[in-house]
Amino acid sequence: MFLRLRFDSKAVRKPVISAVTLKTSALINIIKAEVGPRRGELIVEVDDSIAEKVEKAFEELGVEVLRLKEKVERNERCVHCGACISICPVEAIVLQDGRVEFLDKCVLCGNCVKVCPVKALKLPTT
Amino acid sequence: MKSVEDINEKIREGSVCVVTAEEMKEIVKELGAEKAAEEVDVVTTGTFGAMCSTGVFLNFGHSDPPIRMQRVWLNDVEAYTGIAAVDAYLGATQQSEKAEDYGGAHVIEELLKGEEVELKAISKGTDCYPAKEVRTVITLEDLNFAEMVNPRNAYQRYNAATNSSDRLLRTYMGTLLPNFGNVTFAGCGEISPLNNDPEFRTIGIGTKILLCGGKGYIVGHGTQHCPGYATLMVKGSLKSMDPEFLRAAYMPGYGVTMFVGIGIPIPVLDSKMAEKLAVRDEEIKTKILDFGVQRRDRPVVREVTYAELKSGRIEINGEEVRVSPLSSVYMARKIMEELKRRIERGEFLLTFPVERLTPGKALKPMKTAIKLVKSVMSEAIVISPETSVEIAAKIMIEKGVNHLPVVENGKLVGIVTSWDVAKAVAMGKTGKVGEIMTKRVIVTYPEEAVELAAKKMEENDISALPVVDKSMRVLGIVTSEDLSKLLAR
């Protein structure tokens, strides 16, 4: 499961990932990280079985956690060309019987949105 | 042996056997070419991809008082008016004067969808055409003629693209990730029309086709038509087309283009044609070119088949690289099915070409005088990272230079500028050059075009580039002064 973690100016100074790993023994795979001096945002992957425990541990350290269930949205302009496929960092876009399909592992990075020649894609508004 | 007339007779009777290119491959495999040619009358082929050489001739009708349009804009996209008074050619890739991601292709798509488009035209005014300006709103219905005429469509095959450089490239082949991060390719391979009739026995001048869902014709071979990379010039009335089979597109950082859908019926005249129609992606080869080298002749990274490209992954230098198509097999299938349906219903009769296409000749490059970095570079004065800041300053003054590449064990490891030295002195840092040098050096190569070196300097806001070879040995330096001397000549 993918989790989006948001750190405020306090949480961003703590070694949260290590703390949570030590506490939960969960293997945390960092998919995307943008960390600045005052705030940070991480997208991490953890095993479904331990997700709840990990989520709680992050929250205790003052991190805002959101489970990523949504994926990139597509409209009818899509012509299934596939320009987005090789740009996706997590291989969440595939051709299935000639159609471009988005798998559940989308991390909402937005790379595909930027390269779509017909502007058929957008990030869900949260 | 069948003739096109025999097949048309069957279409009229409703007894014709039509299959798509994909179905035909299986039929030939199963029955053999001889039997397949007896059974099947027509094979529909299709392609759907970005085709820049696309546009529409428009005739707007005359205003009152009339105008001889010297320049005309449709939704701020300029159309070419160097023809008769109210005729213009709107090219798909022409960019809007107001927005980078909007252009001729978008205007064409909006017209086809029945949407209103703003027209502005200007003229000097003449005795016969006194009006100097016209502003109005038009729709496709208001136009007397809207004829799509595309000088180059339906490429038989196309070179695939990758990027060896360390920066992301935004090209007409889509976004290319650094360090061979991905590959993109265009063309539909084994179902694409020209791969199924490579000898142009039935695809020729006058062949009736399905162009963006409407009735179209082949006018001749396309521009840049050459052996192995055949192209077509096609025409059709925009008013007969279906917006489903045409889509305006924008390649980020590059510009506007148009997805065009083309379906071509191939009559199966004999077993030889059936053999050609059995062509598979495994047999269709193309090259992967390195767009990281910004020259006309981009290096070939490797040869590849369409089967490998369509598999989604290929190997480059031992690494697995993901592949993106830029053409849509999904849409090409829809086109083949649509054309098949129309022929079966008796709505689409075949034509035999009035003249055959030639195989074409190898393309000539444009004659331009290219200036390479090696012809303008000057001798570089190099120092070691152990040199003191003071000595570096002295060398700069003595030699009259502002840039000193820093070399260790024969390799470039940094650069110091007179500004770096001044800054170091001002801050009281008077140690070794190695402590104050810029370590991430932007470099150029002797075989690189001067334009490209200039672009690197501008983009990075720097005034000199060390010239190095592949192993980072310093061969010289180009400075902005060297380049301005070129212009002054």
Image: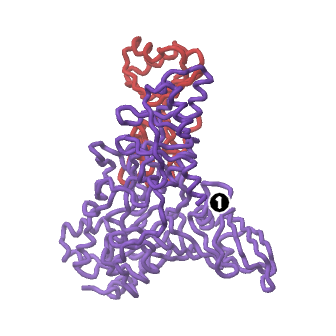
Chain colours: A red, B purple
Relative vertical location of residue B12 with respect to residue B446 in this rendering, above or below:
below
Left or right, residue B219 beside residue B74: left
Q: Residue furthest front?
A: B398
* Quarter of the rendering occupied by the C terminus of chain B: bottom right
Q: Is residue B412 among the parts visible in the rendering?
A: yes
Q: What amino acid does circle 1 point to? A: Ser
Q: Secondary structure at mark 1?
A: loop
Q: Position of residue A102 (x, y in %)?
A: 43, 43
* Residue B263 or residue B478, whichever sits in front: B478
Residue drawn at x 41%, y 42% is B474
- Taking B63 as reference, is B325 above or below it? above
Q: Is residue B477 above or below residue B19?
A: above
Of A77 and B147, which appears nearest the observer?
B147
Looking at the picture, how far across and down is residue B122, in whole percent?
75, 72
Please give the name of the residue rendered at 39% of the width and 57% of the height, measured from the top-left corner: B298
Residue B238: image location, x then y, percent: 57, 73
Residue occupying image coordinates x 36% and y 44% = B470
Quarter of the image for the N terminus of chain B: give it. bottom left
Q: Which residue is mark 1?
A: B96
Task: State the image quarter where residue B23 is shown.
Answer: bottom left
Could you classify mark 1 by the number of other residues whose Cα lies within 10 Å: few (under 14), some (14-19), or many (20 or more)?
many
Instruction: Tell me if I can see residue A77 in this picture.
Output: no
B388 or B51, nearer to the observer: B388
